[in-house]
Image: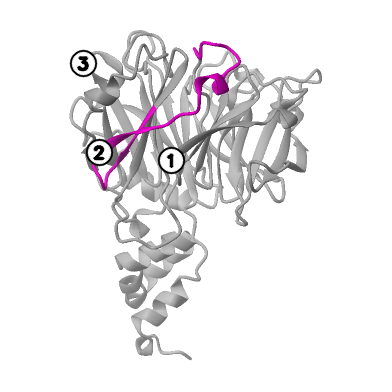
Amino acid sequence: MVNLAALTDDVLADILLGVQSPRDLARASASCSSFRRVISNPLFLRRFGAVHAPPPLGVFCCYPAWGGGVGGSQFCAALPSHPSAALARALASSADFCFNFLPPAASDWLVRDCRDGRFLLDRVRDFSTAFTEVAICDPLFRRYRLLPPIPNDLAASVENPYVQRGGDGQLQSRSSEIFLVSRSDDSVSENDTAFTVIWMACCRGKLVAFFYSSESQQWCALSPPEYYALSTRRVMGVRLGQRNHAHGCFYWMVALTHRWLVLDTRKMEFSIVDISPVLTGRAMMFSNQITTLESSDGRTTVVVSDVFRPDRRCILYFYTFLYFSDRWQLLNRITLPEEWGYRFRGIIGAAEGYLFIKLDDPKENLNDQIERHVEYFSLDVKTMQLGSFCRTTLFTVTEAYLYCGFPPSLSLPSI
């Protein structure tokens, strides 16, 4: 029998890195002081995070203001039947998802993105819905940073931006698209509090974009594609649709076209990709009918939801490509349960080989305010098995962010 006391911390760390489940690693940490000493070391946690994807723990839902009230948000933890339930409960009990640690009033802040354990929020500043005050925060460790305003020489290029969110003229209206760039997974860095923020606005006939780096602490301009490539119309008066991400690239459907607007954050370059071959013959009414997920071999999997069919069924088509110039290969198609046809509201995200699907109320509950709810299901891409993930009793969900992360005992500050 191996004597744990005879093993060095380096040997123990190499052994513990092989533990696949964060839940099992947390249990190991609680069971033995030697394990706890190694696992709690920040260097080990960085190494573990570099080789193991954080599991999905829940969905962060935003809801609108009703009857003159104030909109808000809530974290919906994974259901007890889900493998991540225990980790999700630990996170929910430790984190401040009301963001009371931000400068008051907390109700002024609007969640704009959630990635790598960080949240990006903003609030109206000087009555502008485009140039807002922006905060990056870590609700688990209750830390935040306020970003400096975009310099006037850059802001001057933004002229009458179109509304991207809301539109009711209230505090939840926004005329910009702002989001976080994912961390790089190619190395274990001690500077895991570094971050990059992208800011975008659609103006008449042009797209304007800037990025902020916490390392340079400066806003810089991005060169967008030519305006004529964005739309068949001379005026690009559209909203940017659901933002998808895979392998360092962000994707948006360009309204009224079968094209993608793509931002490669590794090069900080925009491009336009024609995806009409896989969309021909399908009614694409909403941007969340198409989503992306990463494959371990570096390929990108694209899921297209064929919803508006005469038989009222919903069919998911799975395609894959390595480079944009490749011909997309059809991997699979799956027909969702018949009763989901009228409840399906799109795919909110992907993680660990799963898609996460939003469903509205069952038909029999539409008039029952007590039972109304929105459900989120997981779909295993390999086995095509469906499972319940989480549920919210919110009347309406305007934005939903899939939250992936590690439990508090395995987390490090991200700010």
User: Can you identify the residue that label 1 sits on?
Assistant: 268
Q: Which is more foreground, mark 3 or mark 2?
A: 2
Q: Is residue 327 left or right of residue 292?
A: right
The alpha-carbon separation of the residues under discs 1 and 3 comes to 30 Å
Relative to 81, residue 210 above or below: above
Using the image, tell me which numbered label, if any, was put on residue 52. Answer: none
Q: Secondary structure at mark 3?
A: loop
The alpha-carbon separation of the residues under discs 2 and 1 comes to 15 Å
User: Can you identify the residue that label 2 sits on?
Assistant: 218
Q: Which of 53 and 331 lies nearest the eye of the viewer? A: 331
Relative to 192, residue 384 above or below: above
Using the image, tell me which numbered label, if any, was put on residue 126. Answer: 3
Q: Is residue 168 left or right of residue 361?
A: left
Question: How busy is the neighbourhood of tag 1: few (under 14 within 10 Å), some, or many (20 plus)?
Answer: some
The alpha-carbon separation of the residues under discs 3 and 2 comes to 21 Å
Where does the image place residue 331, in percent across and percent down from the top left?
Answer: 76, 45
Q: Could one spot residue 180 in this view of the protein?
A: yes
Where does the image place residue 170, in percent across and percent down from the top left?
Answer: 33, 11
- Outermost residue, left side: 103
The tag earlier along the polypeptide, 2 or 1, is 2
Residue type beneath disc 1 = Met
